[in-house]
Amino acid sequence: MNRIPDAEVLLTPKEVAQRFHVNPKTVTRWAKAGKLTAIRTLGGHRRYRESEVLERLREYKNQALSSRISSWPIRMMT
């Protein structure tokens, strides 16, 4: 059985959703799709490692930024 280090901060689906500006149900779908690792509490609730969420958030922001940059019109300087 995997043990979580005591210092590891766990987030609720609502807290993760707030960081990504999505609905908590979307976070649950991401976990079911394998995009995030969900840890189950004894009561069956999902929790997410803050370190993994922050990593995914950085990837999400980088992806959004690169897609915006690639869609910018290119102007030729003459």
Image (spheres, rainbow, N blue to C red):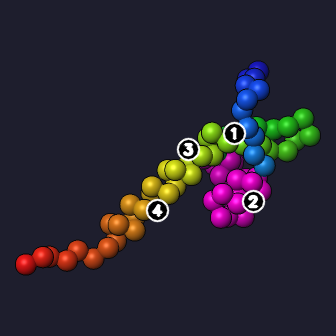
Residue at mark 3 to residue at mark 4: CA–CA distance: 14 Å
Residue at mark 1 to residue at mark 4: CA–CA distance: 22 Å
Residue at mark 1 to residue at mark 2: CA–CA distance: 15 Å
At 45% from the left edge and 55% from the top edge, which residue is drawn? 62
Stretch in magenta:
13-35
Residue at mark 3 to residue at mark 1: CA–CA distance: 10 Å
Pick the residue in front: 27 or 60.
60
Pick the residue in front: 10 or 38.
10
Look at label 1 and name its amino acid. Arg
Q: Which of marks 1 and 2 is nearer the N terminus?
A: 2
Q: Is the magenta stretch mostly helix, strand or loop?
A: helix
* Residue designated by label 2: 24
The percent coordinates of residue 4 (x first, y second) are: 74, 27
Look at label 2 and name its amino acid. Pro
Residue at mark 2 to residue at mark 3: CA–CA distance: 18 Å
* Residue designated by label 3: 55
* Residue designated by label 4: 64
The percent coordinates of residue 15 (x first, y second) are: 74, 54
Circle 2 SS class:
helix
Residue 3 visible in the snapshot: yes
For the residue carrying disc 4, how many other residues have a C-alpha within 10 Å: few (<14), some (14-19), or many (20+)? few
Circle 1/circle 4 CB separation < 8 Å: no
Look at label 4 and name its amino acid. Ala
- Residue 30 in magenta stretch: yes
* Residue designated by label 1: 49
Look at label 3 and name its amino acid. Glu
